[in-house]
Image (cartoon, rainbow, N blue to C red):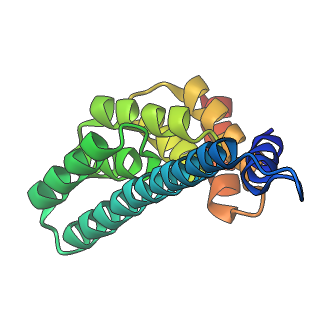
Amino acid sequence: IGGLIGGFLAAAAVGLPKNRKWLYQLAAAAVLIAGSAAMILYGFKNQADRNHDLMLSSLAQEYMEAEENEKAETVLMKAISVNADSPNAYFLLGNLKIDQEDYEKAQEYYLQTIESSPQFHQAHYNLALTYLQLGEIEKAQEQVDLAIEIAPSESSYQDLKIEIANWLKEH
């Protein structure tokens, strides 16, 4: 529909040969230019927010590798404040909480990751590991099955599924 509107405005701005309506053409050209500028600015702003989010997540990951977890958490919270729908930031926060053995908070962050990005198979896998730590074996099994459905070639997912199945047989 955008092409139809743009085409209409462009045709109105150019006009027909030997049938010039200067005021009408000038108004159409002004609307065409203003609309184009608004769309370009909108696109650049949204892309900048996404790039900012990825940059902050990468910085946080570097802090985590350097074992500067407080700095990493601060940066990740900033990433979420910039983009509340940031699966990478939520995922990394979940990983931080796992390191701190705060499994309930990790569970919340992984669930937010999955809500933002249902195909984020690593979040399903990590949530399964979290559920295991919390003693929720059936939920862990569901999550590892989802991870396998999304990424069937991941051998660690298959291994965890077998491990859970063996545990269920024993208990």
Residue at the far front: name it: 18
- Left or right: 19 as drawn, with respect to 166: right
| Picture mark count | 0
Residue at 80% of width from left, 44% of height from top? 8
Regarding residue 13, the answer to whether it shows in the image is yes
Regarding residue 166, the answer to whether it shows in the image is no
Q: Is residue 110 above or below residue 30?
A: above
Front position in the image: 76 or 163 = 76
- Left or right: 114 as drawn, with respect to 90: right
Residue at 61% of width from left, 49% of height from top? 26
Residue at 55% of width from left, 50% of height from top? 39
Q: Position of residue 157 (x, y in %)?
A: 65, 54
Q: Is residue 112 above or below residue 56?
A: above
Q: Position of residue 60 (x, y in %)?
A: 25, 63
- Left or right: 65 as drawn, with respect to 168: left
Residue at 62% of width from left, 60% of height from top? 156
For the N terminus, the image quarter is: top right
- Left or right: 94 as drawn, with respect to 17: left
Q: Position of residue 134 (x, y in %)?
A: 38, 29
Residue at the far right: name it: 17
For the C terminus, the image quarter is: top right
Q: Is residue 24 above or below residue 88?
A: above
Front position in the image: 119 or 147 = 119
